Image (spheres, grey):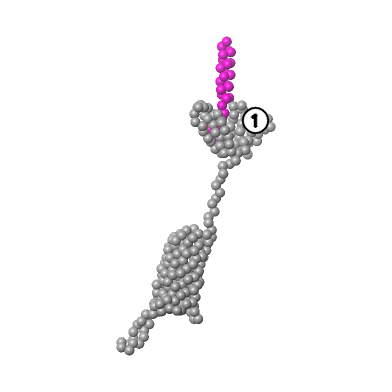
Amino acid sequence: MKKLLLIALCAMFCSITHAQDIIVLNNADEIQAKVTAIDQQSVTYKKWSNLEGPTYTMPKSEIFYIKYANGEKDIMQEQAATIQPTPMSKTRVVASTPASTPRPTTTANVKFQGYVNLGTNFYAEGAGPTLDVNFGARIFEHLYLGFETGFHSIITPFEIWGSSYGFETIRIFEAYVPMGINMKGYFTQGKKVTPYVNCSLGGFIGIADLGGFNGFFCQVGLGMDIKRFSVGMGYNGLVKGGAFHCGYFKLGIRFGK
């Protein structure tokens, strides 16, 4: 009688033990559970110790395999390459779709950008303040192309003979409004200090003592961006019939990306 009772208890214990599913994780930890659902991305289960409790969900990527109460196994796809089931084995590979990986976002090749510069035009006899405003786009990090305008001037002192006081000094104030295309070629990318070659080409409208004198202008020079600040210098020229030559120096700030 005692033997029969002992055998019955053992059978009951074995049936209870094998009635649960075992979830084996990639780190070899085991979870005694009742698997309720498997989809392409995850496994849903309840803990065997609390079947009336909450339902848990675990990504397939964290699971090595699941051993069911009937002895069958499901091996997750991530581990399938290292396990070759035999023809007599009850092990099966679950074809799972890996979690979607976000596509890398491509950096835009064209970025809005512009400059505001204060400076001076100068030559041996005179100098004058300048303002340059240009806005456009940075293309592939190494090229800037934009529209430029502003205000340029040259103040030149002259001595003339005055009938009452002898020689007198007068100042000629020549100014013009440039309108053209500004191009910059950058030597480096992603640096705090970025040197560049500057070129501006276009036309100008004369004002003040240059009133009525319109023509073409050009600027060619070198500069550098220091974070968002900019400094540059080079050659400045006006052309209409003849040519007027001077240098330029600029300090400014860059805005945009």
The residue positioned 50% from the left and 59% from the top of the image is: 111
Total of numbered circles in the picture? 1
Above or below: residue 64 compared with residue 231: above
Judged from the image, the secondary structure of the residue bearing numbered disc 1 is: loop
- Is residue 64 something one can see in this rendering? no
Q: Where is residue 5 in the image (x, y as percent from the top left)?
A: 56, 13
Q: What quarter of the picture does the N terminus occupy?
A: top right
- Is residue 102 something one can see in this rendering? yes
- Toward which corner of the image does residue 62 lie, by quadrant? top right
- Does the magenta run of residues contain 25? yes
Residue at image mark 1: 90
Q: Where is residue 118 in the image (x, y as percent from the top left)?
A: 41, 68
The residue positioned 36% from the left and 81% from the top of the image is: 170
Other-residue count near label 1 (Cα within 10 Å), few / some / many at <14 / 14–19 / ≥20: few
Tag 1: amino acid: Lys
- The residue nearer to you, when weighing 231 against 216, is 216
Q: Position of residue 143 (x, y in %)?
A: 52, 63
Q: Give the range drawn in magenta.
A: 1-29
- The residue nearer to you, when weighing 62 against 213, is 213
The residue positioned 57% from the left and 28% from the top of the image is: 21
State the residue lying farthest toward the bottom: 163
Q: Position of residue 221 (x, y in %)?
A: 48, 70
Above or below: residue 117 compared with residue 28: below
The residue positioned 47% from the left and 61% from the top of the image is: 113
